[in-house]
Image (tube, rainbow, N blue to C red):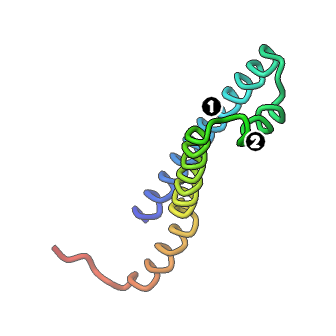
Amino acid sequence: MFLKNKIEDRINSNNKKIQGLERLIESLDRDVRDLFEEIEVSPQQIQQLLSDPKNFTEEDWQRIEECRQQQDKQLECDLANIQNPRSTQQAYSSNSRVKSHWLCVR
């Protein structure tokens, strides 16, 4: 029972963190939108500028590509390491049924 409550508390805590991150992302999106309006440039124009190697020196372009590759690797790693609290809860609940006949002895 205690383990189930602990897992539920973790799920609730993670949900609160997710809500906080969603608010932060919305705020950042508004800031970026305001910046684009202020400088009168669209995201597509920025993307087009950054995707053309002719706009950069060879050295700068290499650094940009290295940064992109590093970010892609980091994103893949982060996505692979995300834990699913519901599957964890199911795993613990299935294990608790197996051990329900055990007695705690100190």
* 80 to 38, vertically: above or below: below
Residue neighbourhood size for the residue with mark 2, other residues' Cα within 10 Å, grouped as few (<14), some (14–19), many (≥20) = few
Eye-nearest disc, 1 or 2: 2
Residue positioned 52% across, 60% down in the render: 77
Q: Quadrant of the C terminus?
A: bottom left
Out of 95 and 23, give the one closest to the viewer.
23
Q: Which residue is mark 2?
A: 52
Residue positioned 54% across, 49% down in the render: 66
Q: CA distance from mark 1 to mark 2?
A: 31 Å
Which quarter of the figure has residue 19?
top right
Q: Residue 16 placed where, x, y %?
A: 57, 41
Residue closest to the far left: 106
* 67 to 2, vertically: above or below: above
Amino acid marked by disc 2: Asp
Out of 95 and 27, give the one closest to the viewer.
27
Amino acid marked by disc 1: Leu
Q: Secondary structure at mark 1?
A: helix
Residue closest to the far top: 38
Indicate left or right for 19 with 11 as reference. Answer: right
Residue positioned 54% across, 59% down in the render: 82
Q: Residue 61 placed where, x, y %?
A: 61, 42
Q: Which residue is mark 1?
A: 24
Out of 40 and 5, give the one closest to the viewer.
40
Residue neighbourhood size for the residue with mark 1, other residues' Cα within 10 Å, grouped as few (<14), some (14–19), many (≥20) = few
Residue positioned 55% across, 64% down in the render: 80
Q: Secondary structure at mark 2?
A: loop
Q: Residue 59 placed where, x, y %?
A: 55, 40
Q: Residue 63 placed where, x, y %?
A: 54, 43
